[in-house]
Amino acid sequence: MTTSDSHLLGPVEIRELAAELDVTPTKKLGQNFVHDPNTVRRIVAAADLSPDDVVIEVGPGLGSLTLGLVDTVERVIAVEIDPRLAGRLAQTVNERAADYAERLDVINIDALKVTAEDLPAAPTALVANLPYNVSVPVLLHLLEEFPTIRRVLVMVQAEVADRLAAAPGSKIYGVPSVKASFYGEVTRAGAIGKNVFWPAPKIESGLVRIDVQDMGWSRDLRPKVFPLIDAAFAQRRKTLRACLTGIYGSGASAEEALRKADIDPGIRGEKLDVADYVRLAQVSHVGF
Ligand code: SAM
């Protein structure tokens, strides 16, 4: 790792790059660029990466975080939907961190659609300042598509960070919390203020870390587990028996499956942890 931050992008460089590319950041693509080297260093440190990691970075934008990653890991695969930004990134890394330029691959594609065939190598970590409007779908898509990912460190809206890391029973515990915890341990990894971005967003941001691990179940269960989670939270105030009636065909069948999995049919879905949903899927023989 380099000790100097001089290659990272500050406010002046960010404005210059945006002007050169004639980029006016759009809300639609969640374009808020980090113009603060300290924040970049904080994100990279929180990711706790190894030199041999292969990082997939979603939405590299003008390259703020990319420059903090290329001097830290073996390879960075940057997936950017905006062709102007994707087209300039290699040059930016070449100009500012030439020694590491070979470590970078840029792919101009929608991260919601990226598959293993699109990448030159299997990623071991996901580190990103995610576009806010698609942060959870992108996160879940990548966790599913790339089982080689062991570590996730993403910046998202603060309230999304809270929801992702929420524990069963809390008000904000919901579909994203249960689904993310299907893959590993999810924790909050710090808060980020608005002023580290250009343009500054209206809301605070937060870091989320996921340590992907063997949870004691097969990922092949996902197509059975995730519809149960969706149904259980679709009507938050109803009991599990009522919420799952559609999936099981009748209230009685839903109750039977819940009892078989040792779950009280009279409680709400927000009381269950991911292991409960997995157990329910394992005892269920209905088609989903
Ligand atoms: N990483 C940069 C930084 O920290 O300054 C930019 C982060 S900005 C919050 C989000 C980036 O994601 C933008 O560059 C935007 O163009 C890109 N983006 C938006 N939707 C995307 C998608 N579906 N797939 C890939 N990139 C996307």
Image (cartoon, helix red, strand yellow):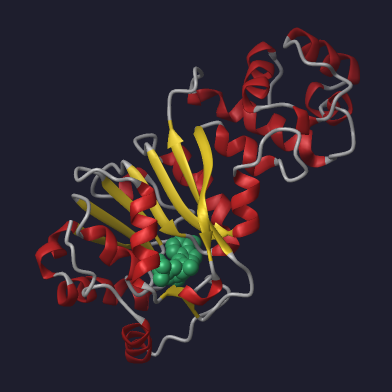
Hey, which residue is sitting farthest top in the picture?
260
Hey, which residue is sitting farthest left in the picture?
99
Who is closer to the viewer here, 90 or 33? 33
Please say if 185 is above or below 61: above
Please tell me which residue is depicted at 65% across the width and 41% down the height of the picture: 166
**Does the image show residue 96?**
yes
The quarter of the picture where the C terminus appears is top right
Q: Horizontal placement of 130 versus 39: left or right?
A: right
x and y percentages locating residue 270 in the rendered image: 77, 33
x and y percentages locating residue 168 in the rendered image: 71, 33
Q: Horizontal placement of 276 versus 250: left or right?
A: left
Quarter of the figure with residue 278: top right
Who is closer to the viewer here, 120 or 269? 269
Ligand 1 picture quarter: bottom left
x and y percentages locating residue 154 in the rendered image: 46, 53
Q: Horizontal placement of 228 versus 139: left or right?
A: right
Quarter of the figure with residue 6: bottom left
**Does the image show residue 81?**
no
Please tell me which residue is depicted at 75% across the width and 39% down the height of the picture: 170
Please say if 241 is above or below 77: above
The quarter of the picture where the N terminus appears is bottom left
Please say if 245 is above or below 90: above
Please tell me which residue is depicted at 49% across the width and 17% down the height of the picture: 216
